[in-house]
């Protein structure tokens, strides 16, 4: 029972955590974790969402409108893409170039973001232009509230960037 409470507490502190991430962070065996998650889900204390090969676990009552965003920001590449799209609509080739990613990588992640309903895709000639469907302020709030360590990394990156700009002058 103590192990189950520990698992529940971690899910509450990191909503949208993946099964593998949860197992790694808690040092729990796969079978043991599966059993406890099954019991917690049966008791209605947690629920999970599957996207692709990953299973994302949320505490009961987690805000439905934020579930998709938490899933999206759990992957570093998607998080970078979302942050880039906060600047405005952008084509796939520009995203690939600015993030130093291959076109197929960008295409895959954009497909996942479109499936989640976080990004819209529209064709303009040969290009596909992507636009956020969420207010950037909401995305920033979700990162800050549900992934504070990511927020700290972003703040550190901004400080580094501002420091380097000051050094160049």
Image (spheres, rainbow, N blue to C red):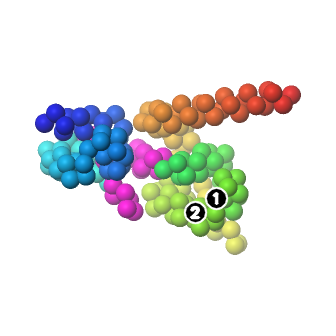
Query: In which quadrant is the N terminus drawn?
Result: top left
Query: Who's the residue at 86% across and 28% down the image?
Result: 169
Residue 68 within the magenta-colored segment of the rendering: yes
Q: Are marks 1 and 2 in contact (CB under 8 Å)?
A: yes
Q: Examine the image and state in which quarter residue 123 appears.
A: bottom right
Instruction: Reply yes or no: does residue 121 show up in magenta.
Output: no
Is residue 167 at least partly visible in the picture? yes
Residue that sits furthest to the bottom in the current view: 126
Q: Which region of the structure is painted magenta?
A: 50-74
User: In this picture, is 55 found above or below 45?
Assistant: below
**Callout 1: helix, strand or loop?**
loop
Q: Residues within 10 Å of mark 1 (few under 14, many from 20)?
A: some
Secondary structure beneath dot 2 equals helix
Counting from the top left corner in percent of width and height, residue 68 is at: 42, 50
Instruction: Say left or right for 93 vs 21.
Output: right
Disc 1 target residue: 101
Number of dots carrying numbers: 2
Q: Nearer the viewer, residue 22 or 48?
A: 22
Residue at the right extreme, as displayed: 169
């Amino acid at each position: 029972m103590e192990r189950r409470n520990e698992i529940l507490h971690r899910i509450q502190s990191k909503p949208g955590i993946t099964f593998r991430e949860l197992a790694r962070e808690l040092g729990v065996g796969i079978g043991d974790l599966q059993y406890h998650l099954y019991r917690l889900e049966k008791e209605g204390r947690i629920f999970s969402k599957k996207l692709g090969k990953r299973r994302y676990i949320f505490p009961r009552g987690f805000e439905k409108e934020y579930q998709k965003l938490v899933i999206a920001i759990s992957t570093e590449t998607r998080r970078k893409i979302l942050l880039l799209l906060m600047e405005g609509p952008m084509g796939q080739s520009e995203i690939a170039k600015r993030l130093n990613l291959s076109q197929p990588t960008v295409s895959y992640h954009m497909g996942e973001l479109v499936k989640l309903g976080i990004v819209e895709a529209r064709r303009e000639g040969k290009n596909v232009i992507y636009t956020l469907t969420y207010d950037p302020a909401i995305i920033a709030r979700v990162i800050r509230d549900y992934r504070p360590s990511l927020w700290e990394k972003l703040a550190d990156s901004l400080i580094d960037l501002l420091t380097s700009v000051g050094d160049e002058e």
